Image (cartoon, rainbow, N blue to C red):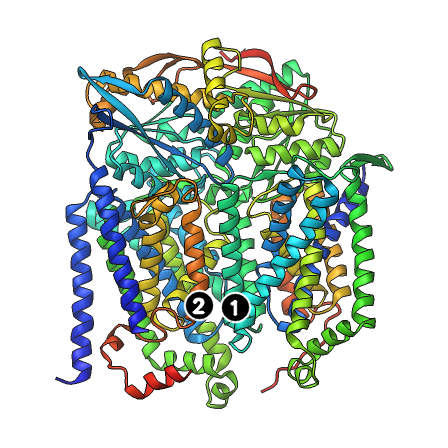
């Protein structure tokens, strides 16, 4: 028995990865009340772009390219698939999101030939092995949570202290009134997708450095779990999503450590159902009342 | 002749022609022919799509648990129908499994081989449906209180949990764990599938045109108003959920028959998405649409568009573009176009008999004005 | 909406006409090829996509190369051109029946494949109905042949492979505790896990077995569990993609025991992941590069001259065992066609049980069930410096 430490270390790292994806869900849901089912696939595409760009280009070009490509993808999805449905029922938008997810996966399947793509050229330094307190791991495991928390601080600052941040908060509070107050709602929505995709791209770089293989379904599970994290923390709340993600990451690894590996995924969903039934607003969510 | 009568005759004629076509296919083509295979699969999808439409289209409950209920139905069917002497082989890692009987064999004992086997098979399907309905009742208690998208994600999660349970080694003596269930009896011709699914869909149709169906639609259109009219929301939602799951369970059993082997892996959320998209293509709120879309989707994805994957399509030879996966890309682009620009799908909320209706001039103008 | 409906309907009809036109020309058992010879069709039932896509492609390469070496066959005194009909079964059992139907529809005389067992069993039912014989190439689950009258296979079986590895781990590596890891829902993984566990416990060792859900990328905690259990080996009979991730995680977590893999591991993708890592890995396999000089040099030349083939092989010319098996399967099928003296599937099916063929992977002949008579497996180890599989020994179990 080598103790709990390696599991905790890994759990925090996994939590960091989920957090970076969860923020994308929570931001979009906060404003559009839409579960962006395609977000996990955006994450996967970021991984694929990383695989292809790092084999062809030096890192100082390849990595910015991943960020840019992912942001463009997120922005385009919103403009093409969600914006035309702004006045449609919520179910239509969600179906559109599922359609986009289906399309992205099929496209990725076509491009990769349906075969998982190994990361043959991992990002140097962070993919190296280190030993902390007797536990051996990759450097990226340590870096992920630190970078996540740093990015969250930047984001929270952005939202609380800049004009666009204020607009985002206003739109999340009351979509129609915000529009009436002269907020360019489309710009705000695009911004949330840009931020969400950017963080997903960062998450993808860390995730696929740690687990160097990108399959077309790679985005599915992390995406769903990140969504659960967002709900757990209280959807719409950024700190909530981050805390939720860390809790889920830790629980998952501890469950594996206890030997219940069969149910490591199922646990997350069980947690989701329990949270939804007991406290639908999550840890930090605000109570929303439905208007007639 | 009155319009209603005309419509009835028209509908009956169309259905008869389709059934006759199916019988002809069965008589002329061997059962392993690709046409028979796709008819079988499309029929199963039709039933499941209609059951999903009942929930999503007619009641307005956005549930994504269909794959989970199908899984239950499929496993119930397999576990109950595998012949006893095949069980040691199938449950090779679990000492022949815990269940030592097979419904078709029991009934074959006193009803004769042919009749008995079919009765046993149908009964196994029914058990699958009932299990799915029971599970829906249990899940529905907490989950149905949730609002649209929360409900969607909760049912999706439930289907994933169910899948893990069915693959769990401790349940191996019943579910065979991670290994396939196989060697169970199945209809090899297409007609039994069509008749069976047709009957089920007819029952759903009867339900939709009843008072309950009207209550479902009232809930979809406006929950608050429906409640004010004296409709018991909780009761009706639960009912719709249970009924939909029942038919999804039966659909799952038929899916098992079609596939020839049962594993938990195919019943992933992707399956639910696929069925949801079929419902959307057909038109949310149209039974005819769901059936039509299932056939279109399965025929094109499994058969007609295969050339898109194999390098040659409609006489165009382009191995560079028409390679593996292109077919699904084309299909998903079509789906996106429908979702974005033809939001009503093929049929909107019309049914087969409505095709006889002349479109009033006024409505045409209105549509043009939009 | 009516217009749209009519349009869609018309489109579908047009498409089905085209499709019928296409299939009717393909439904004949023998038609004339470009060279004027009659054509015999051999179906290739392999995954090109999904978890086993990479392995399936390598297996197809062997058949394509064999077809390149020997494009014609003498059947009943006539020369036939052999045409490979390749259909992708997408790794999973649910796509098996329609892919198999597609092959039957194309009028093949005999089928080769598949790489994995689950999809072979799913397709087997269709082949049985159609009476078309199938030769399993690397599907190792006993049930593929035991429950299907038309299925034969040229590789060894899971009970054999599991026993070989258990013996090797216990006797040669001197390990008494093994950690066994398979994917949830994969009958291949779980079958091998079962046989390995049985054999290893019979020898007196202890086994800790765990499963991971499909789509897992993070194997860190599994490796930690193996370390906590004090396991000297990790036996993970998983598909190539997961094998790569397990190698990666074992290296990162500093696992100092050995990794044991089944025939799936014998892939240049896995060895690429292992290159430069601080791990040791052993695999059982069907063929060892260098086993047959003429075959090795011939196929290397062919792969290097053919860009598509090279991509499908994972970007280099290293020969996977599955490629050699695909090659042997093709020639076994030709032998059966010759012996049958006809392209009728029924005749081929009757001829197959008595076929024997000296392939590059050894002598191939079938027992009563239709399984290959094989009593030895090659054991190879990963050379993490050169990035190649090094031969260790031939292991035989009596």
Chain letter, disc 2 residue = B
Q: Quick one: quadrant of the C terminus of chain A?
A: bottom right
Label 2 vs label 1: CA separation?
Answer: 8 Å
User: Which percent across, then down, holds residue B164?
Assistant: 55, 49
Q: Which residue is mark 1?
A: B140
Quarter-of-image position of residue C126: top left
Looking at the rendered structure, whether the residues under marks 2 and 1 are on a common chain is answered as yes
Q: A193 or C50, which lies in front?
A: A193
Above/below status of C365 relative to B144: above
Above/below status of B245 relative to C162: below
Crowding around mark 1 (Cα neighbors within 10 Å: few <14, some 14 to 19, many 20+) is many
Above/below status of A285 relative to B186: below
Residue at x 53%, y 54% (from the top left corner): A104
The answer to whether the residue labelled 2 contacts the one labelled 1, judged by CB atoms less than 8 Å apart, is yes
User: Which percent across, then down, holds residue B355?
Assistant: 25, 75
Q: Is residue C202 visible?
A: no
Q: Secondary structure at mark 2?
A: helix
- The answer to whether residue B141 is left or right of residue C97 is right
- The answer to whether residue C256 is left or right of residue B78 is right
Comes first in the chain, label 2 or label 1: 1
Crowding around mark 2 (Cα neighbors within 10 Å: few <14, some 14 to 19, many 20+) is many
Q: Which residue is mark 2?
A: B242
User: Which percent across, then down, holds residue C248?
Assistant: 68, 33
Residue at x 18%, y 83% (from the top left corner): B3
Quarter-of-image position of residue B58: bottom left
Residue at x 49%, y 54% (from the top left corner): B270
Q: B159 or A150, which lies in front?
A: A150
Q: Residue furthest left?
A: B1
Q: Secondary structure at mark 1?
A: helix
Above/below status of C333 relative to B136: above
Q: Quick one: quadrant of the N terminus of chain A?
A: top right
């Amino acid at each position: 028995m080598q103790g709990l430490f390696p599991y905790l270390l890994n759990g925090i790292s996994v939590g960091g990865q989920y957090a970076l994806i969860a923020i994308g869900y929570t931001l979009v849901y906060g404003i559009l009340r839409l579960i962006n089912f395609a977000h996990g696939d955006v994450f996967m595409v970021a991984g694929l772009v990383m695989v292809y760009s790092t084999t062809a280009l030096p890192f100082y070009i390849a990595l910015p390219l991943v960020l840019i490509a992912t942001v463009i993808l997120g922005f385009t999805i919103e403009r093409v698939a969600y914006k035309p449905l702004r006045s449609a029922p919520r179910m239509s938008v969600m179906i559109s999101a599922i359609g986009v997810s289906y399309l992205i996966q099929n496209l990725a399947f076509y491009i990769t030939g349906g075969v998982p793509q190994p990361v043959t050229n991992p990002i140097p330094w962070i993919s190296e092995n280190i030993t902390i307190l007797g536990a051996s791991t990759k450097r990226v495991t340590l870096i992920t949570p630190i970078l996540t928390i740093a990015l969250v601080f930047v984001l929270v600052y952005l939202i609380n202290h800049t004009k666009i941040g204020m607009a985002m908060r206003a739109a999340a509070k009351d979509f129609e009134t915000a529009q009436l107050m002269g907020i360019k709602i489309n710009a705000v929505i695009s911004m949330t997708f840009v931020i969400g995709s950017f963080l997903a791209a960062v998450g993808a770089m860390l995730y696929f450095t740690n687990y160097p293989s990108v399959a077309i379904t790679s985005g599915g599970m992390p995406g769903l779990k990140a969504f659960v994290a967002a709900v757990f923390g209280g959807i719409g709340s950024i700190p909530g999503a981050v805390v939720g993600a860390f809790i889920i990451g830790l629980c998952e690894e501890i469950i594996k450590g206890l030997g219940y590996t069969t149910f490591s995924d199922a646990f997350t969903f069980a947690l989701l159902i329990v949270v939804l039934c007991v406290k639908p607003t999550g840890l930090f969510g605000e109570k929303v009342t439905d208007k007639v | 002749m009155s319009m209603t009568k005309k419509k009835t005759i028209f509908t009956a004629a169309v259905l008869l022609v389709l059934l006759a076509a199916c019988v002809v296919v069965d008589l002329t083509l061997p059962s392993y022919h690709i046409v028979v295979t796709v008819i079988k699969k499309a029929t199963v999808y039709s039933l499941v799509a209609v059951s999903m439409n009942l929930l999503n289209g007619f009641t307005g409950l956005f549930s994504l648990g269909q794959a989970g209920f199908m899984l239950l139905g499929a496993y119930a069917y397999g576990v109950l129908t595998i012949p006893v002497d095949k069980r040691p082989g199938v449950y090779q890692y679990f000492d022949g499994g815990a269940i030592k009987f097979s419904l078709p064999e029991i009934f074959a004992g006193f009803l004769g081989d042919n009749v008995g086997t079919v009765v046993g098979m149908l009964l196994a399907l029914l058990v699958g449906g009932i299990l799915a309905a029971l599970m829906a009742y249990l899940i529905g208690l907490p989950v149905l209180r949730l609002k649209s998208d929360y409900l969607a994600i909760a049912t999706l999660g439930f289907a994933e949990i169910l899948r893990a349970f069915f693959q769990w080694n401790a349940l191996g003596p019943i579910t065979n764990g991670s290994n396939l269930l196989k060697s169970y009896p199945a209809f090899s011709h297409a007609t039994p599938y069509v008749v069976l699914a047709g009957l089920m869909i007819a029952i759903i149709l009867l339900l939709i045109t009843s008072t309950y169906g009207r209550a479902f639609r009232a809930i979809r259109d406006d929950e608050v108003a429906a409640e004010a009219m004296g409709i018991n929301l909780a009761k009706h939602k639960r009912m719709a959920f249970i009924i939909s799951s029942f038919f999804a369970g039966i659909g799952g059993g038929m899916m098992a028959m079609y596939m020839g082997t049962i594993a938990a892996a195919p019943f992933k959320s992707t399956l639910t998405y696929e069925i949801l998209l079929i419902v959307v293509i057909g038109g949310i709120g149209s039974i005819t649409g769901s059936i039509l879309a299932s056939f279109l989707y399965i025929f094109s994805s499994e058969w007609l568009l295969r050339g898109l994957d194999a390098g040659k399509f409609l006489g165009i030879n382009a191995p560079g573009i028409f390679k593996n996966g292109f077919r699904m890309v084309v299909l998903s682009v079509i789906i996106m176009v429908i979702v974005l620009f033809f939001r009503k799908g093929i049929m909107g909320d019309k049914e087969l008999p409505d095709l006889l209706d002349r479109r009033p001039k006024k409505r045409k103008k209105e549509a043009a004005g939009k | 909406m009516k217009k749209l409906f009519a349009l869609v309907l018309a489109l579908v009809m047009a498409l089905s006409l085209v499709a019928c036109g296409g299939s009717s020309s393909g439904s004949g058992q023998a038609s004339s090829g470009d060279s004027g010879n009659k054509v015999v069709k051999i179906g290739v039932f392999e995954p090109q996509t999904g978890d086993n896509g990479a392995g399936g492609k390598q297996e197809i390469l062997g058949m394509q190369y064999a077809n390149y070496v020997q494009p014609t066959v003498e059947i009943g005194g006539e020369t036939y051109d052999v045409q490979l009909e390749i259909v992708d079964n997408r790794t999973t059992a649910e796509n098996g029946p329609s892919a198999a139907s597609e092959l039957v529809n194309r009028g093949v005389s005999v089928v080769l494949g598949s790489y994995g067992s689950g999809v072979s069993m799913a397709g087997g039912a269709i082949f049985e109905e159609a009476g078309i014989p199938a030769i399993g190439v690397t599907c190792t689950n006993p049930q593929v042949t035991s429950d299907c009258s038309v299925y034969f296979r040229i590789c060894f079986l899971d009970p054999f492979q599991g026993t070989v590895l258990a013996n090797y781990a216990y006797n040669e590596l001197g390990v008494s505790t093994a950690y066994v890891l398979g994917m949830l829902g994969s009958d291949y993984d779980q079958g091998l896990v079962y046989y390995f566990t049985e054999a290893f416990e019979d020898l007196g060792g202890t086994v800790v077995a765990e499963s991971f859900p499909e789509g897992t990328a993070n194997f860190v905690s599994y490796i930690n569990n193996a370390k906590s259990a004090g396991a000297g080996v990790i036996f993970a009979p998983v598909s190539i993609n997961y094998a790569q991730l397990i190698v990666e995680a074992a290296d990162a977590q500093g696992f100092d025991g050995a990794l044991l893999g089944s025939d799936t591991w014998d892939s240049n993708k896995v060895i690429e992941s292992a290159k430069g890592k601080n791990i040791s890995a052993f695999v059982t396999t069907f063929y060892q590069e260098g086993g047959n000089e003429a075959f090795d040099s011939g196929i290397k030349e062919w792969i290097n001259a053919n860009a598509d083939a090279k991509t499908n092989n994972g970007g280099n010319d290293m020969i996977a065992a599955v490629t050699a098996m695909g090659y042997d399967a093709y020639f076994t099928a030709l032998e059966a066609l010759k012996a049958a003296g006809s392209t009728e599937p029924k005749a081929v099916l009757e001829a197959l049980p008595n076929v024997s063929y000296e392939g590059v992977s050894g002598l191939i002949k079938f027992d009563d069930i239709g399984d290959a008579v094989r009593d030895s497996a090659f054991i190879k180890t990963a050379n993490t410096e050169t990035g190649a599989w090094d031969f260790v020994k031939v292991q035989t179990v009596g």
